[in-house]
Amino acid sequence: MNWFADQAVIAIENARLLTETQEALAQQTAAAEVLQVINASPGDLAPVFDAMLEKAMRLCGAALGVLQTYDGSRWRTDAARGVPPAYAEFRRNNPPAYSHPGTAPARLLAGERVVHIVDLKDEDAYRSGEPNRRALVDIGGARTSLLVGMVRDDTVCGFIQLYNQEVRPFSDKQIGLLQNFAAIRR
């Protein structure tokens, strides 16, 4: 009986190692693909940002994603994926006020480098009726958010933000992966 238990433990450990190896390979492949895009488009960051966002969303299993840059006074959306047309239209007509305290970008500018909101409906911004948060949840279908800052020389230059359409926190591995993607721009 002991032999069977030992074999089961070995099998479980082998499965865990295989999964970790497959995840690491997927991350390395995604990074290599982004680097290929960088090499193929010197001086043009749009395809690089789009590739970064696409790979990050795929590896983290996110339904929606946005990559924005910041010039010190204004935010600009440089890549967006999975954003429902009705929500995109709402944002065009009602640009988000990122300076409002409590918004993820405001928290980023205040010094947080990772802003993970497990349930967007369970936040003061949603409960108080803040229009952009309401639209993100009610029109965009977002429920969980992960924002990671792109920082250069201690200065915020943008962020990558991913969303799940159900209340499903991002794992520590997914957060680390998104931090790696955000660091590519440094």
Image (spheres, helix red, strand yellow):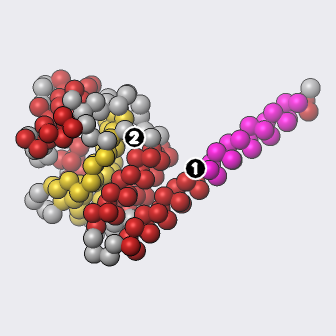
* Residue occupying image coordinates x 58% and y 50%: 23
Q: Secondary structure at mark 1?
A: helix
* Residue occupying image coordinates x 18% and y 23%: 127
CA gap, disc 1 and disc 2: 16 Å
Instruction: Return the disc, 1 or 2, that comes first in the chain's sequence.
Output: 1
Q: Is residue 96 left or right of residue 29?
A: left
Residue 116 in magenta stretch:
no
Can you identify the residue that label 1 sits on? 23
Q: Secondary structure at mark 2?
A: loop
Residue 62: mark in rendering: 2
Q: Is residue 51 left or right of residue 32?
A: left
In the rendered image, the quadrant that contains the C terminus is bottom left
Question: Badge 2 local density, few (<14 within 10 Å), some, or many (20+)?
Answer: many
Q: Position of residue 14 (x, y in %)?
A: 74, 44
Foreground pick, 5 / 92: 92
Q: Position of residue 41 (x, y in %)?
A: 34, 72
Look at the image and give the residue range highlighted in magenta.
4-23
Foreground pick, 101 / 169: 169
Q: Is residue 54 above or below residue 186?
A: above
* Residue occupying image coordinates x 21% and y 29%: 139
Residue 12 in magenta stretch:
yes
